[in-house]
């Protein structure tokens, strides 16, 4: 029996990208497959992306459309796409075609060899960003040592891996790290990172920063360990300094006012450290509250099944 592959495409402000994206996938991937579906997820785009998606679905009866009520972020849109995929495996492709579409065929072959998870590592990037390089350096050092320094992207998931991802049901998490945490048999494929065909990335610095915070807090003990280590250093230094001040007063008769500038610097620095510690602890407390109230990770606005628009067009003619 021929296996079925789903191709998930998160969409955000993609009205000028989607037709080029679909045509490239059609030419280089879909014509090579026997059984497939394309799942497009509109992540709250404020342009005409949804209308373009419907036009594509009317042309191809294997395109499924999912519309979120607002912008929930790239990770959530990716998660939604995997949840609505009905294939034996599902591959992720960006709308901007920075991942060459033909890589899907390589990932599909890797899945057929028994790998339940296929990840992509970047063999080269024509538009490197300093923020991305710093993020992956930090993630490799403090979050997960298996993350390549050159970067990592979600490639393909087996149906069992997708079901496991659904069970995790976490808010404010990083899907890529969730997949790495699962431990299924996997393969890492090298993939070039191409330039965007048009427009600018919606994945700005603030979103990268949020991803970094989600990754560290969700999958690393580093923040708590950092606070504990610095607190011990300051506590030890405070005791030693107190002993030195007492001895200096007794033995040398130094006036109490001596060292006022140094004392103020330490007080100000210590206050900043306390505020930093409270902010980190507050982040953990907030996420605990967010998980306890069970607010949904996303809200669906509309779902159009594959073939629904195409069949309507046939009836109209």
Image (tube, rainbow, N blue to C red):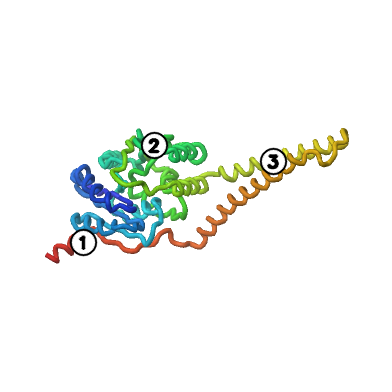
Q: Horizontally, is 193 left or right of 169 in the view?
A: left
Q: Horizontally, is 245 left or right of 24 in the view?
A: right
Disc 3 is placed on an element classified as helix
Asked if one can make out residue 3 in the rendered structure from this viewpoint, the answer is no
Asked if one can make out residue 151 in the rendered structure from this viewpoint, the answer is yes
Which of the 4 quarters of the picture holds residue 301? bottom left
Number of marks in the rendered image: 3
Tell whether label 2 touches label 3 (CB within 8 Å). Answer: no
Look at 18% across and 64% down and name the residue there.
312
Distance from the alpha carbon under mark 3 to that under mark 2 = 39 Å
Disc 2 is placed on an element classified as loop
Tell whether label 2 touches label 1 (CB within 8 Å). Answer: no
How crowded pointer 3 is (Cα within 10 Å; few <14, some 14-19, many 20+) is rated as some
Report the disc number at residue 165. Answer: none
Between 248 and 76, the residue placed more toward the observer is 248
Query: Could you tell me residue 74's position as x and y percent?
Result: 39, 51
**Residue indicated by mark 3:** 234
Query: Could you tell me residue 141's position as x and y percent?
Result: 50, 36
**Residue indicated by mark 2:** 128
Query: Could you tell me residue 238's position as x and y percent?
Result: 74, 40
Look at 62% across and 51% down and name the residue there.
278
């Amino acid at each position: 029996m021929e296996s079925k592959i789903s191709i998930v495409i998160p969409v955000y402000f993609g009205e000028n990208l989607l037709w080029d994206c679909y045509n490239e996938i059609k030419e280089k991937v879909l014509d090579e497959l026997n059984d497939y579906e394309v799942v497009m997820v509109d992540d709250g785009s404020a342009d005409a992306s949804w209308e373009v998606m419907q036009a594509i679905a009317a042309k191809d009866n294997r395109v499924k459309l999912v519309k979120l009520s607002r912008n929930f972020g790239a990770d959530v849109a990716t998660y939604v796409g995997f949840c609505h995929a009905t294939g034996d495996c599902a591959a992720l492709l960006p709308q901007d075609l920075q991942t060459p579409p033909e890589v899907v065929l390589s990932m599909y072959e890797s899945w057929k060899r028994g790998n339940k998870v296929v990840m992509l590592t970047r063999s080269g990037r024509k538009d490197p960003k300093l923020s991305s390089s710093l993020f992956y350096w930090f993630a490799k050092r403090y979050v997960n040592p298996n993350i390549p320094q050159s970067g990592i992207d979600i490639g393909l998931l087996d149906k069992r891996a997708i079901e496991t991802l659904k069970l995790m049901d976490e808010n404010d998490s990083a899907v890529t790290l969730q997949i790495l945490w699962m431990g299924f048999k996997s393969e890492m494929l090298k993939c070039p990172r191409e330039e965007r065909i048009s427009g600018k990335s919606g994945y700005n610095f603030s979103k990268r920063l949020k991803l970094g915070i989600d990754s560290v807090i969700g999958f690393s003990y580093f923040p708590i360990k950092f606070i504990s280590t610095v607190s011990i250093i300051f506590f030890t230094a405070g005791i030693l300094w107190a002993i030195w001040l007492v001895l200096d007063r007794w033995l040398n008769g130094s006036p109490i006012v001596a060292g006022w500038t140094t004392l103020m610097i330490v007080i100000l620095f210590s206050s900043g450290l306390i505020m930093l510690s409270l902010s980190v602890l507050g982040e953990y407390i907030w996420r605990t509250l967010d998980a306890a109230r069970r607010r949904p990770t996303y809200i669906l606005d509309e779902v159009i099944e594959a073939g629904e628009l195409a069949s309507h067009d046939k009836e109209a003619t």
